[in-house]
Structures are given as C-alpha cells and as structure tokens.
Image: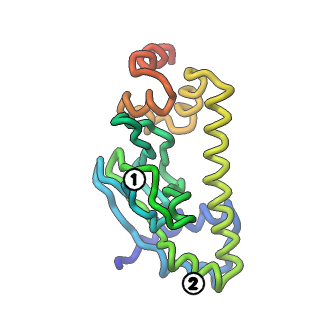
C-alpha cells in the first residue's frame, strides 16, 4: 500500500477537525489505514452488486452516484473535493450495493477499508466519534437532497449546486446533471440560460 501525500493527509485532518478533532495519538493510529487511490475519468469506484469495502475522501476530482433502472441511469448524488462518499448502506450492512460510484474526472481519493476501520473503532473512542460524524455528514447530505427535491424547483436546485461548486458543475455532463435535478436535458439547457 502506498503512502498518502502529506498535503492530502493534511486536508483529511482538517476535515476531521471540522467534524470531531483527533488527538495526535489517535491521528497517528488512523493514518496507517489511509490508502491513496486514483481513478481515471469514467472509472468505477464500485459497481452495483458489489459489497462496498471503503469510505472515500476526495482530494481531487468528482464522483457521481447512480442507480440503473430499466436500462436508464438515474443520478442520485455527486461527491466533490473534500467530501466523503461511499455506497454507505452496503458498507454498513455488508450487502451488495444498489448504487454505482463513477469518477466523472480524474479523481484522487484517500480511502479507508471497512475491516481496518471497524477494528480502529473498537480500539479508539476518538476514531469512532469521527466515524460517527462522517456517517452523520453523509446522512445530512442525503436528507438535505431529499428535502430540496421536494421543496425547491429544479431551477433553485441548480442554482444551489452552482453556488456551492461553480467550477465543477460546469464539467458535469448535461445528461448526468439533468438526471440529478430530475429533469430532461432540454429543460436544463433552458435553466442554464437563465444563469
């Protein structure tokens, strides 16, 4: 297993500090578990039907989360730099994933294996607290998306996404972005002209 770059580890530690700071001792127990992995554009992090073995922290790039329904890909989420992503239900239950994660650009992640993370949680309450906060962050992102989908228009949702990630939103293919917003690509083209 290769060693993560110091700058990437620093970004991860800063993200942890926002969630629940780790002491130096707990951080030093955690860092040997971190594996840097690079994914080429369009490469899959996990396919539906596989059991998710990792949580990923993106240090560069962009990932989409989607399901395939009757041959049509439906985009559920995007993960951007400095965010965590995973087929988290599969990660927790050890059951096959219902979603696929795909890199939409050359993507760099720091990932943590399920078995090694579970062992660290048993040994370190500090690490377990960070793990809980990561789970809470994933849950809040999912709930926020669901509420936004029910209470805001596609134009408002697009505007929100554009404000949060202006540079990366421009790189997402229209068909994926339209699917994420729950509209047809033609409707997205009209919305984009308004911005």
Instruction: In the rendered view, tell whether residue 114 sits above or below residue 47.
Output: below
Q: Residue at x 36, y 49 (%)?
A: 103
Disc 2 marks which residue? 29
Q: Residue at x 66, y 43 (%)?
A: 143
Q: Quadrant of residue 69?
A: top left
Q: Nearer the viewer, residue 61 or 177?
A: 177
Label 2 element class: helix
Image location of residue 178, percent across then percent down: 44, 27
Instruction: In the rendered view, tell whether residue 188 sits above or below residue 47.
Output: above
Instruction: Please state if 195 lies on the left or on the right of 120 as rendered.
Output: left
For discs 2 and 1, the disc positioned in front in the rendered view: 1
Q: Crowdedness of circle 2 by 10 Å Cα count: few (<14), some, many (20+)?
A: some
Image quarter (top left, top right, bottom left or bottom right) of the N terminus: bottom left
Whether residue 7 is visible, yes or no, is no
Instruction: Please state if 82 lies on the left or on the right of 144 as rendered.
Output: left
Disc 1 marks which residue? 48
Q: Residue at x 42, y 48 (%)?
A: 63
Q: Residue furthest front?
A: 70
């Amino acid at each position: 297993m290769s060693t993560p770059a110091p700058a990437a580890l620093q970004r991860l530690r800063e993200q942890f500090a926002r969630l629940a700071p780790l002491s130096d001792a707990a951080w030093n127990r955690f860092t040997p578990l971190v594996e840097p992995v690079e994914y080429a554009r369009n490469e899959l992090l996990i396919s539906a039907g596989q059991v998710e073995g990792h949580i990923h922290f993106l240090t560069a790039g962009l990932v989409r989360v989607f399901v395939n329904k009757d041959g049509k890909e439906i985009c559920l989420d995007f993960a951007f730099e400095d965010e965590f992503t995973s087929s988290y239900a599969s990660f927790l239950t050890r059951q096959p994933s219902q979603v696929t994660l795909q890199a939409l650009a050359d993507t760099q992640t720091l990932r943590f294996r399920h078995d090694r993370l579970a062992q660290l949680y048993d040994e370190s309450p500090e690490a377990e607290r960070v793990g809980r906060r990561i789970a809470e962050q994933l849950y809040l992102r999912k709930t926020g998306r669901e509420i936004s989908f029910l209470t805001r228009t596609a134009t408002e949702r697009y505007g929100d996404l554009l404000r949060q990630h202006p540079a990366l939103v421009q790189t997402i293919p229209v068909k994926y972005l339209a699917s994420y917003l729950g509209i047809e690509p033609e409707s997205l083209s009209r919305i984009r002209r308004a911005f």
